[in-house]
Image (cartoon, rainbow, N blue to C red):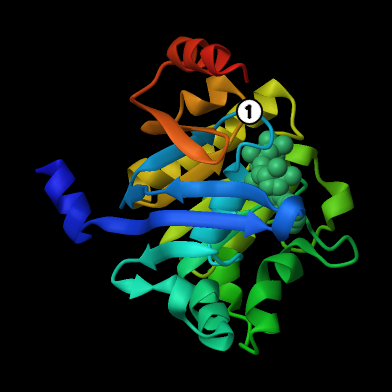
Amino acid sequence: MAEMTRDIGLGTAARTADLHREYGRGTAAVRALRGVSVALASGTFTAVMGPSGSGKTTLLHCLAGMDRPTRGSVWWGGTEVSRLPERRLAELRRSRVGFVFQAFNLMPAMTVAQNVELPGRLAGKRPDRERVREALAQVGLAGRERHRPGQLSGGQQQRVAIARALVSRPEVLFADEPTGALDRATGHEILALLRAGVDRDRQTCVMVTHDPVAAGYADRVLLLADGLVVDELDRPTAAQVGDRLSRLGG
Ligand SMILES: Nc1ncnc2c1ncn2[C@@H]1O[C@H](COP(=O)(O)OP(=O)(O)OP(=O)(O)O)[C@@H](O)[C@H]1O
Ligand SMILES: [Mg+2]
């Protein structure tokens, strides 16, 4: 039944079908993804793992509508994202997906609240102060609106980045190594926050990580190697993930 549900796209927040992504042409071509079909069930937390260069970031960018497939398709619910014209895609992306980067990518001269408002402003929307406060409270930063990123710890800065990604109430939250720049204890806080979003708000979340302990927070782990999904683990423990990874040579 679960498989059938996936096939017809019900309860699936995003999926790819035979996704290929090549960079460059001819002899210089790099085949970053070579036929990836994955479905992200709504309200689940997926970790994407694999050796460096295996295509994790490329997969995340294609799923998030930030990069275009060379072949194959990407879907958000019933919408084929990969066929949308650029303007429509940008519009939809702003409302349907949130993205968190390893390096936070905050604007140092702006306040926390201004950073969270920024994507909306760039889209020409009037800032919704109440919603910004709500998003900051959701990540445990109530009352920090007027601080600047430089006055916050690394973990707090990543929380601001998560609030910025969540402020539009996206269907899917994407995170590329969100704990890569943090120490273990701070990383744990961020992972617990992502996990709580899935459990409490039925947020769909996809995270790239190199850390088996981080992957242990996910419901499912997809293992990539050389542009293909080569393995999948449900309800993984960190030990299981570490074992599979070492077999991949990652
Ligand atoms: N813009 C680009 N132009 C050319 N090649 C690229 C580009 N982006 C990625 N690649 C290549 O595509 C392959 C997959 O890259 P990708 O960044 O998706 O890997 P990754 O699994 O995220 O690696 P890492 O763990 O190091 O972040 C690599 O061989 C990479 O060099
Ligand atoms: Mg990467």
Decide: is 157 above or below 13: above
Q: Is residue 169 left or right of residue 147?
A: left
- Residue 162 x %, y %: 61, 53
Q: Residue at x 57, y 87 (%)?
A: 87
Decide: is 243 above or below 84: above
For residue 120, what is the image quadrant?
Answer: bottom right
Q: Secondary structure at mark 1?
A: loop
For residue 234, what is the image quadrant?
Answer: top left
Q: Amino acid at mark 1?
A: Pro
Q: Residue at x 58, y 83 (%)?
A: 86
Q: Residue at x 84, y 63 (%)?
A: 107
For residue 90, what is the image quadrant?
Answer: bottom right
Quarter that holds the N terminus: top left
- Residue 142 x %, y %: 62, 54
Tell which of 148 and 115 is nearer to you.
Answer: 115
Q: Is mark 1 within 8 Å of ligand 1?
A: yes
Quarter that holds the C terminus: top right
Decide: is 249 above or below 46: above
- Residue 242 x %, y %: 53, 13
Tell which of 211 and 156 is nearer to you.
Answer: 211
Residue 60 visible in image: yes
Q: Residue at x 37, y 49 (%)?
A: 37
Residue ranking furthest to the front: 27
How many discs appear? 1
The crowd level at tag 1 (other Cα within 10 Å; few <14, some 14-19, many 20+) is: some
Q: Which residue is mark 1?
A: 51
Residue 139 visible in image: no
Residue ranking furthest to the left: 1
- Residue 112 x %, y %: 75, 61
